[in-house]
Image: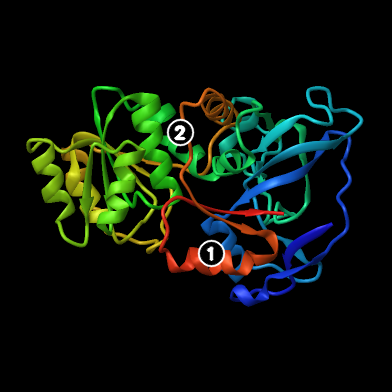
């Protein structure tokens, strides 16, 4: 099969397009013919060997986690899927036997692995995954839309919907609306929950796209003070909940934007891993902080159900041929896009 893989860490030039062996399913696995794969920051960090993702070579590693396609082969013990089924893949593989997996909190599994980092991923014509990680798609859902879902929607659902329990009468703040997580949060908060949504972004063009996704108010952080504008919009109260996938650069803005009793949800730190926390304000204002890394299998089931029903429609910026994966990586690093970047074989 054709695939994009690395044999060393480095910049986008280390991505190679060529032949790799076709995968074969184990007893509980399915082989999926890839229809589309979505890029994530994790792909960049894996390629660079950053943030604890350095590995030894050989063997080569096929990058990519988020993917959707058609099942073409199944293992001997597979019972819920058959060849021809259209599926989307949860790229986080949990062990299935630890206390967390047994209690339904499999997102906390300490032995979990990720497609495209610990094992060969979806930048390929074929990918093999456990049966439990493949979820059926309706015929009218495109592989591109489905591939854009997992890594961006799962942490939002985990933190804000399941654990922090955003309500329809509340107001939520979403940082960096143009990124995958930001665009996902806007849709989930507006279309699934029904909350009031405030989003931040960097240009008038991106602001208009955020409104089209469902944001009620958009703050251009290059022209306006985020926390000051939030106070204006909320009549001085602040927001009930916010989602931050940016990290250090927006931490103080976010903390000042929360009302008393508000919930700070963070699932990424692309701008920096360290920030200063005012402990006095944390307890005196009774702020709750939620961290999220992906989500549970049940979260994924609910997300796919919403996708199949047309409740959520991922924002996709551009789709590249698989052979042009290096160009897609460079585009992600340039950050001049709104929504997801995809690859198609």
Residue 257 location, quadrant: top left
Q: Residues within 10 Å of mark 1 (few under 14, many from 20)?
A: few
Q: Can residue 208 be seen from the camera position used here?
A: yes
In x, y percent, where is residue 79?
83, 23
Compared to residue 252, the image places residue 328 above or below, namely below
Question: Which residue position is annotated with label 1?
Answer: 51
Compared to residue 23, the image places residue 5 above or below, namely below
In x, y percent, where is residue 283?
21, 40
Question: Which residue position is annotated with label 2?
Answer: 157
- Tag 2's secondary structure? helix
Indicate left or right for 225 with 107 as reference.
left
Residue 281 location, quadrant: top left
Residue nearest the viewer, comparing 115 with 94: 115
Of circles 1 and 2, the one toward us is 2
Which mark is first along the chain, 2 or 1? 1
Q: Can residue 49 be seen from the camera position used here?
A: no
């Amino acid at each position: 099969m054709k695939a994009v893989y690395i044999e060393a860490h480095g910049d986008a030039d280390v991505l190679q397009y060529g032949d790799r062996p076709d995968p074969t399913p184990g007893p509980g696995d399915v082989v999926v013919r890839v229809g589309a794969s979505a890029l994530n920051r994790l792909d960049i960090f894996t390629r660079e060997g950053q943030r604890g993702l350095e590995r030894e070579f050989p063997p080569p590693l096929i990058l990519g986690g988020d993917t959707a396609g058609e099942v073409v082969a199944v293992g001997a013990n597979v019972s819920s899927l058959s060849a021809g089924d259209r599926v989307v893949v949860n790229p986080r593989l949990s062990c299935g036997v630890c206390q967390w997996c047994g209690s339904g909190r499999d997102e906390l599994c300490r032995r979990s692995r990720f497609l495209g980092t610990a094992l060969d991923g979806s930048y390929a014509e074929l990918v093999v995954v456990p049966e439990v990680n493949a979820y059926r798609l309706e015929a009218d859902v495109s592989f591109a839309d489905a591939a854009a879902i997992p890594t961006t929607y799962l942490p939002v659902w985990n933190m804000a919907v399941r654990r922090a329990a955003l309500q329809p009468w509340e107001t939520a703040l979403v940082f960096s609306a143009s990124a995958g997580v930001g665009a996902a949060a806007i849709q989930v908060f507006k279309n699934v929950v029904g909350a009031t949504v405030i989003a931040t972004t960097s240009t008038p063009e991106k602001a208009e796209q955020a409104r089209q996704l469902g944001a009620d108010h958009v703050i251009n952080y290059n022209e306006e003070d985020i926390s000051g504008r939030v106070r204006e919009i909320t009549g001085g109260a602040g927001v009930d909940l916010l989602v931050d996938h940016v990290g250090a650069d927006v931490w103080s803005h976010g903390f000042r934007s929360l009302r008393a009793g508000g919930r700070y949800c963070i699932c990424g730190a692309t701008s920096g891993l360290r920030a200063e926390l005012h402990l006095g304000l944390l307890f005196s204002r009774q702020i709750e902080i939620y961290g999220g890394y992906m989500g549970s299998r049940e979260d994924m089931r609910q997300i796919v159900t919403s996708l199949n029903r047309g409740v959520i429609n991922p924002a996709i910026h551009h789709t590249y041929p698989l052979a042009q994966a290096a160009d897609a990586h460079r585009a992600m690093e340039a950050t001049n896009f709104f929504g997801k970047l995809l690859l198609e074989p």
